[in-house]
Image (spheres, rainbow, N blue to C red):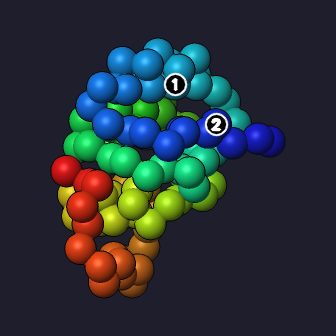
Amino acid sequence: MSAVPLGEDLGIESCTELKDRLAPCLDEQRTLLLDGSRVTRVHTAGVQVLCALVRSRAEAGLRTELDGCSQTLHDAIRLLGLGEQFGLGPNQQPAKDPVEDAA
């Protein structure tokens, strides 16, 4: 099973394209893997698109996992208090460096 690449930019300007790209994955019966390893820029709106996908799939009994998570994406998710929703356990700590690209 291959992971769906999220790309480098999850900024607000790319949210419509991200939503359109992920829409066909809503009903994927197998565990959906999202590859966030290349993400270098994140806005809250981008994380909201991902949250909507994860939540919709969970409500349908479908599983979604991060199969790679850049430090930028990891920090944004943790700052927004969404670590558990994305499978980042409560014991994982955010980076010590300040987050500049996560808003």
Q: Residue at x 61, y 39 (%)?
A: 5
Secondary structure beneath dot 2 equals: strand
Which residue appears at 30% of the width and 26% of the height?
13
**Few, some or many residues within 10 Å of mark 2 (<14, 14–19, 20+):** some
Query: From the viewer's perspective, is residue 84 above or below residue 65?
Result: below
Residue 67 pos. (x, y %): 62, 55
Position of the N terminus, as image quadrant, is top right
Residues at marks 1 and 2, CA–CA distance in whole angstroms: 8 Å
Q: Is residue 26 visible?
A: no
- Residue highlighted by disc 1: 22
Up-down relation of residue 6 to residue 86 (above or below)? above
**Dot 2 corresponds to which residue?**
4
**Mark 1 touches mark 2? (CB < 8 Å):** yes
**Type of amino acid under label 1:** Leu
How many numbered circles are shown? Answer: 2
Of residues 44 and 100, the one nearer the viewer is 100
Q: Is residue 101 left or right of residue 54?
A: left
Q: Position of residue 102 (x, y in %)?
A: 26, 54
Please report whichever mark, 1 or 2, sits nearer to the chain's N-terminal start: 2
